[in-house]
């Protein structure tokens, strides 16, 4: 970051690192819904919009990272629900007067195509990579090391204003 006229305070490192941890906390709360992580990152970014440049910058980078991963997770969730809902093994639960007893074989009737499993493996690896990168970045930023994610940092630079919005500067 090109913020040469402002010395970062320890609380700023912590607040910038928390931007990355916010998405992890949201993942625990709303794991099946990918949009929850983006909403949490966006709320954190909005709450820090009057903070120093470093905090705003890292909050925006964390938000952009969530925006990039969200479509992949949403497609995986939508595809899974589509397969499950179109093969109706739960019709006994939905239809009010069915005499059908739900057994283990009802749950094995789903046929997931090989392409689905390949995509699910890709999404799982992407999420594991993102999880490790987020934790590593949060630790590094809390130590005062500026971490710039490949591709995302350039977009963050373009979107984040260098204007000093911190109302508490001396």
Image (spheres, helix red, strand yellow):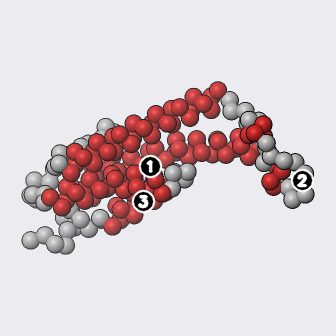
Task: Determine the CA span between mark 3 and mark 2.
Answer: 42 Å
Tell whether label 2 touches label 3 (CB within 8 Å).
Answer: no
Question: From this viewpoint, which residue is outermost toward the top?
Answer: 114
114, 95: nearer the viewer: 95
Q: In the rendered structure, which disc, 1 or 3, sits on the residue that comes first in sequence?
A: 3
Q: Is residue 20 left or right of residue 167?
A: right
- Label disc, if present, on residue 67 of the rendered structure: 1
Q: Is residue 16 left or right of residue 152?
A: left
Residue occupying image coordinates x 64% and y 42%: 80
- Label disc, if present, on residue 98 of the rendered structure: 2
Residue occupying image coordinates x 16% and y 72%: 168
What secondary structure is marked by label 1? helix
Question: Could you tell me residue 30's position as x and y percent?
Answer: 51, 56
Is there any visible trace of residue 168 in the rendered image? Answer: yes
Question: Could you tell me residue 150's position as x and y percent?
Answer: 31, 37
- Which image quarter: residue 44? bottom left
Question: Could you tell me residue 82's position as x and y percent?
Answer: 69, 44
Residue occupying image coordinates x 26% and y 68%: 50
Question: Of tags 3 and 2, which is closer to the observer?
Answer: 2
- Label disc, if present, on residue 14 of the rendered structure: none
Task: Determine the CA span between mark 1 and mark 3.
Answer: 11 Å
- Label disc, if present, on residue 40 of the rendered structure: 3
């Amino acid at each position: 970051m090109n913020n040469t006229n402002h010395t970062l305070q320890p609380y700023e490192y912590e607040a910038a690192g928390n931007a990355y941890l916010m998405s992890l906390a949201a993942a625990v709360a709303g794991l099946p819904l990918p949009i929850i992580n983006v909403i949490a990152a966006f709320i954190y970014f909005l709450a820090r919009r009057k903070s120093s440049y470093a905090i705003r910058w890292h909050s925006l980078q964390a938000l952009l990272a969530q925006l990039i991963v969200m479509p992949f997770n949403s497609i995986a969730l939508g595809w899974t629900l589509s397969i499950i809902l179109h093969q109706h093994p739960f019709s006994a639960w939905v239809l009010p007067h069915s005499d059908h007893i739900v057994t283990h074989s009802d749950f094995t009737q789903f046929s997931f195509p090989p392409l689905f499993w390949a995509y699910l493996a890709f999404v799982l690896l992407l999420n594991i990579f993102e999880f490790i990168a987020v934790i590593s970045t949060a630790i590094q930023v809390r130590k005062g090391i500026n971490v710039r994610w490949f591709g995302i940092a350039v977009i963050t630079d373009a979107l984040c204003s260098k204007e000093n919005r911190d109302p508490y500067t001396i």
